[in-house]
Amino acid sequence: MAQWAGVSEKTRREVPSLELLSLVAGIELGEFVRSHTTLPFRRAITSYQPSLEHGCSKNKDMLFISGMRLAREGAYFCPHCVSADHLAYGVTYWRRDHQLPGVMACDSHQEPLQFVRDSASFLYSPYDCIKNSSRVCSELANLTMTHKVIISFLKISRSLISNRHPIPPKNIQISLRNRASVIGLRTHSGKSAAPLMSDYLAGNLPQNWLQSVFPDLSETLRGVPMHQLDGIFHSTASTSSVVPYILACSTLFSSAEEALHNINSVPGEFIKRSKNSVIKFNAKLRNHYIQAKGKHDALDGHSFPDKSIVLAGLENLGLPDLIDTETHSALVAVRSFFSDKKSLVDSAALGHIEIVTLEDIIRKIGCHINPTLNDIAGL
């Protein structure tokens, strides 16, 4: 390939293997890296040069050193995809999605994946590896299709791998700390009786799946801080891989969509504005929220074309989505609790919503107390 590209005299540090592959494929280097490697996943959340786009030619050292690394050990494939490829093209290829940590079943065929432990298998086609492969156990595969937190983990992973830029850890720390403090987890490095994030994950996720995505956790004693995981709340530098951040997001947020909104939002986007413009924006947003009767989807899209800023502004003001349908009304439940002074149980019953749903709404309304509680906890 180097001879074909006319760069045979150059070293692989000067012209990394990924660049040679992109030249042969006829695809721009950055696009090739973002579409055909696991580097965008592995660098999805990092403090190391977060301003560089994935596959940026300005840092070929990174492409040389880590561009070809895997996101997890082994080579995974779906036998149904292999058959379909062979029938349609006469050749088979590896799917990047199947190489992501935690993926145990094919998203298209809803069947357990097969795998070969030797990573050198990527030098061959999946078809050549079928005879020597093992099948992911059905229990593990079913978890990835039925367990809410695991499904969220995989959705977040698949979304992050499509980002052009890494996300600095500091951009999501405030949201993570706020969420963790709501459920009583320890969010600082000092001594505390509050449970650790590492203990919380170990106690709330299936051990066999957790072992597959973050095996170090099983070697940590309960009650002993694990910097790779517990450090994500206070360390501005990356604590380890991207996996602990995704584990925390999929556990702390109620949905993958909510987690991704918080991950991709730029902190301080309202603070950067002048004080008067912030006041005017908040007043306008609050007025439209009233007109929409608390329903986020009913906000005037023409007045607020950037949905991410709107959602961030509503969260900043403590104005949650008060979903109101023919059978369920968060608006009725919230009014009953705050305006009519009814109990949490009675209010949820009147709105025909779950108590945990009402609790989550109340926490969002009380968002301004979280920073103060975090400061108190740090004393």
Image: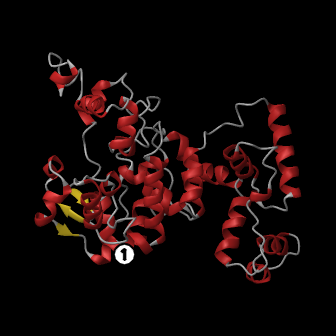
Query: In what quadrant of the picture does the N terminus appear?
Result: top left
Q: Is residue 179 above or below residue 167?
A: below
In the picture, measured across the screen, residue 342 lies left or right of residue 28, that is right
Residue extending furthest toward the left = 132
Residue, x 28% and y 26% (percent of image)?
Answer: 61
Q: Could one spot residue 4 in this view of the protein?
A: yes
**Picture mark count:** 1
Residue nearest the viewer, comparing 13 with 124: 124
Query: Picture coordinates of residue 89 (x, y %)?
Result: 27, 53
Q: Secondary structure at mark 1?
A: helix
Q: Could one spot residue 193 in this view of the protein?
A: no
Query: Picture coordinates of residue 40 (x, y %)?
Result: 39, 41
Residue extending furthest toward the top = 9
Q: Residue 88's quadrant in the figure?
A: bottom left
In the picture, measured across the screen, residue 9 lies left or right of residue 92, that is left
Colour setting: secondary structure
Q: Is residue 324 above or below residue 370?
A: below
Query: Picture coordinates of residue 177 (x, y %)?
Result: 55, 52
- How packed mark 1 is, by other alpha carbons closer than 10 Å (few <14, some 14-19, many 20 or more), is some
The amino acid type, in three-letter code, at marker 1 is Asn
Query: Picture coordinates of residue 48 (x, y %)?
Result: 39, 33
* Residue that carries the numbered disc 1 in the rendered image: 142
Residue nearest the viewer, comparing 68 with 183: 68
Residue, x 66% and y 67% (percent of image)?
Answer: 360
Residue, x 26% and y 61% (percent of image)?
Answer: 87
Residue nearest the viewer, comparing 24 with 242: 24
In the picture, measured across the screen, residue 160 lies left or right of residue 118, that is right
